[in-house]
Amino acid sequence: MPRPPSRRGAPRTDQMNARPETDPARLTPDREVEDFYETAPCGFVTLDLQGTILQANATFLNWIGRRKDRGLTLREVLAPASRVVLDLQSLDSLPSQGETHAIALELLRAEGGRLPVLAWFRRAERPGEPPLLRATLFDATERRRYERELLAARRAAEDAASRLSVVLESTTDGVVLVGPDWRIAYANQRAAALLGHALEEGADFRTSFPQDLDGAFATHCAAAMEGQNGSGTEGWLPDGTCLWLQPHPATGGGIAVFFRDLSRTKALEQDRDRDRARIEYLATHEPLTELPNRQHFAERAEHLLRDGHLGAALILLDITRFRRVNETLGRPVGDLLLRAVAGRLRTALRPGDLLGRLGGDQFGVLLPGGREGSGHDLEAVAAGLAGRLVQTLGASYSLGPHQVEGGAAGGIAVARGGQPFEALLDAAELALSEAKQRGRGSIAVHDPRMGHEGDLAFTLREALAAGEFILHYQPVFAARSGLLRGYEALLRWRRPDRGTLAPQRFINAAEASGFIVPLGAFVLDRACGDAAMWEDKQLRVAVNVSLEQLRHPGFVGAVARALRRSGLHPSRLELEVSERGALAHGSDSVATLRALHALGVKVAMDDFGTGATQLSYLRLFPFDRLKIDRSFVRQVATEPRELAIVQGIVDMCSRLGIATTAEGVETEAQRRALAEVGCEELQGYLLGVPQPMEGNREPPILPVI
C-alpha cells in the first residue's frame, strides 16, 4: 500500500497525480498519524474541486478494489444514482472552509458489488493556492440494513395499527383504551355512540361515568388498573340503555374497556320469558275462560287430597242450555256464554276454593276440608255453596245482541282423607247425572246407596251389550288444497233416557273401572270396519287411545285383530295418543308405540301443547303427526303470540318430518292463518261437524258455520 508523502519531501508519483501548482506538503499527514491514516476503518480522500482524487488511504482503495488512485475521479467509482447526487451537490460550491457537508453515496466495488457510504466533505483553502476538498467516508452497510429493518418494522406497525383500527371501528362493541393516569388514549366511534357523548383523547375517563363513580363499574375499572382480571358488570345509562361493561388490564399499564349494548338482548330475553310463561300458562289453563284446565285441576286436587288428609268436596256444574246456544246462535256466542259463566263463578267463590273448566260446558269447584270441621259439615257447606252457584248461573245473560236464558245443575261428592281424585270425580259425575235427571236448577249429593242404576261403570257395560255406543266421524282436510284426507272416529253414547252423550260424560268412569279396554276394542273394530267400506281407499281413520289402553298388555294384539278382521290396510289407521299417554311409563310406552309402528300403523300425538310435553320424546319415538290443541287455535287469527307459538310448532315438526293437524278450526280467519304458517291439515266445526255413517258410504260433511 503506498504511503502518504512526507510533509517535508516531494510527493511520490506512484501515489498521487499531483498538480504543479499544489504544494505537496499540504497533502501529507503527520508521520505520527500515518499508520492511523492508512488503517482507519473509514476512508480518507483528498480531491480537487473538479472531483479528481489526489490522495486516498488504503481503506478507501480496498473498498473500490484499486491499488492506485492516480487519475481517478470520484464519479468513476460511484454508482450511477450517486453520480447524479454528486452532480446535484456541485462540490465546487460547498460551504467555506471549516464547514462540513454530508452526502449518502454508493461506491462501485471492482467485483461488481456496491458499498453504501456516508461521505463528509470539508473545504480546505490556503492563501494563494487552489482550494481542495477533504472527504471522510464511513461504511454505511449496517446503517442501511438498520434503516431498512426500521422502515419495514414501521410499515408493519402501521399496517397492524391500520388493521386494528378497522377492526375496532367496525366492531359493534365500544372500545376505550385508558392510560395509567386515567386519560383516554383511544376511543372508537361505537363507544361514543353508546355513551351518548364524545370521548376526547386526553380526557379523564372517569368523568364519562359521573353517575357510577362509586358503583360496580368503577370498582371493576379500579381493580383492572391494578392488574386484576375481573368480571364484567351491567350498567344502565340515564336514557335506559343497558350496557355490559368489562375492563381488562392493558399491556404496559392502563386498561382496555369494552362496552356492549344489551338492550336488544334484554328485550329478547323478556320476550322469551313472556312466551315461556304464556306456554306454561296455556299448558295448565283453558284459554277461553282462563281457568285451570282439566289436567291442571286434577293435579291440584290430587295434591290437596294427598297432602291435606282432611278431605274435600267437589262440585260439578253443568250449563243446561249451552248446547242449544251453540247450535242456534253459533260458537262465538257460546264462547261468550262460557266466559260469562266463568266470571260469575269467580265472584261467587271463597278464597282458597279451586275453580276449573273440566270440558265443554262442565265446571268444577273443589272445596278443601279442614275449615268446617267434620265431613258432614263439609257436605253441608258444599251443598249451600252449590245452591248459590246454581242460582247465580240461572240468571239470564246478555251476550251482545242476544238475551240468553240461564240454567245449571250441580253434583256434589265429598272425599275423606286419602281418597283418589278420580274416585271423587266419578262420584260427582254420578251425582251430576242424578241432578240433571231431576231438571234444571237441581242439586244432588252423591250417595253410595244409589245402586246399579246410578253406577256408571255398571251402566257402561250394559250399554255396550245393548249396542248403545256409536261412532261419529269428523272430517280432516288438507289446509291448502282443501282435499279430504280422512276422518277422526269419535265415540258417542246414545242413551234412550238422556239422548246422545259425549265421551266427557263417561270416559273417566270407563278408565277408572278398566272398562275402557273392551270399550276401546269396540271402537277399534268398528272404526276399522267402517273405513274398510269407504269408497275412497286413500282416506285414513283416526282413533283415540287412552292411557289405560296403551299400557294394557293385549293392546297391540287388539289393534292387529281389528286390522285383520276388517281387511283395512294398516297405513290407513292412525292412533291418537294424548301427551299424558305418550309420557306415561317411560320406556314401556315407547316400546308399545314402536310395536304399533311395526304393524304399519300411524301414531299421532293428540292435544299437543296442553300437557307437560317432553320434547325428548319426539326424538325417542318418531311420531307421524302432531295435533295442535284447539287452545292454541282459538286466538291464532287475533293474537300474534298465539300465531307465533303455532308457527314454532309447525316449523319444528317440519324439520323433524312430522305432519301437523290443527284442531278446533271454527272461523275462516283461523283457517287462513293456519294455512299461511304451513299447518298441513285442519279439523273443526268450520269444515265439518261429527256425523254418523250413512250405509256403506263415507260420513256426510256438514259444516256448522
Image (cartoon, helix red, strand yellow):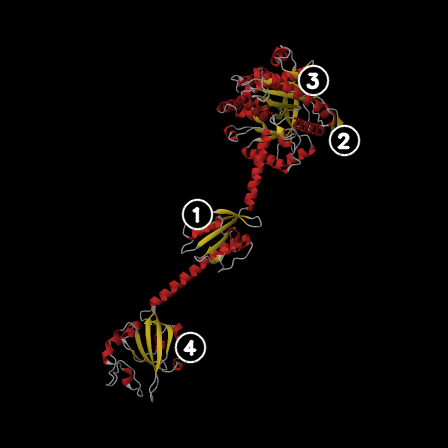
Mark 4 residue type = Leu
Point out the tag, 2 or 3, that comes first from the N-terminus.
2
Frontmost residue, 547 versus 355: 355
Q: Position of residue 242 (x, y in %)?
A: 54, 47
In the picture provided, is 604 more to the left or to the right than 202? right
User: What separation in Å lies between label 2 and label 1 (alpha carbons)?
Assistant: 67 Å
Q: Of helix, strand and loop, which one carries label 4?
A: helix
In front: mark 1 or mark 4? 1
Point out the tag, 1 or 3, that comes first from the N-terminus.
1
Mark 2 residue type = Pro
Mark 1 residue type = Gly
Frontmost residue, 468 versus 527: 468
For label 4, count other residues whose C-alpha is less than 10 Å away and answer few (under 14), some (14-19) or many (20+): few
From the image, tell me which residue sits under label 1: 230
Mark 3 residue type = Ser
Query: To which quarter of the image does residue 534 belong?
Result: top right
Residue 462 visible in the displayed image: yes
From the image, tell me which residue sits under label 2: 401
From the image, tell me which residue sits under label 4: 88
User: What separation in Å lies between label 2 and label 3 (alpha carbons)?
Assistant: 29 Å
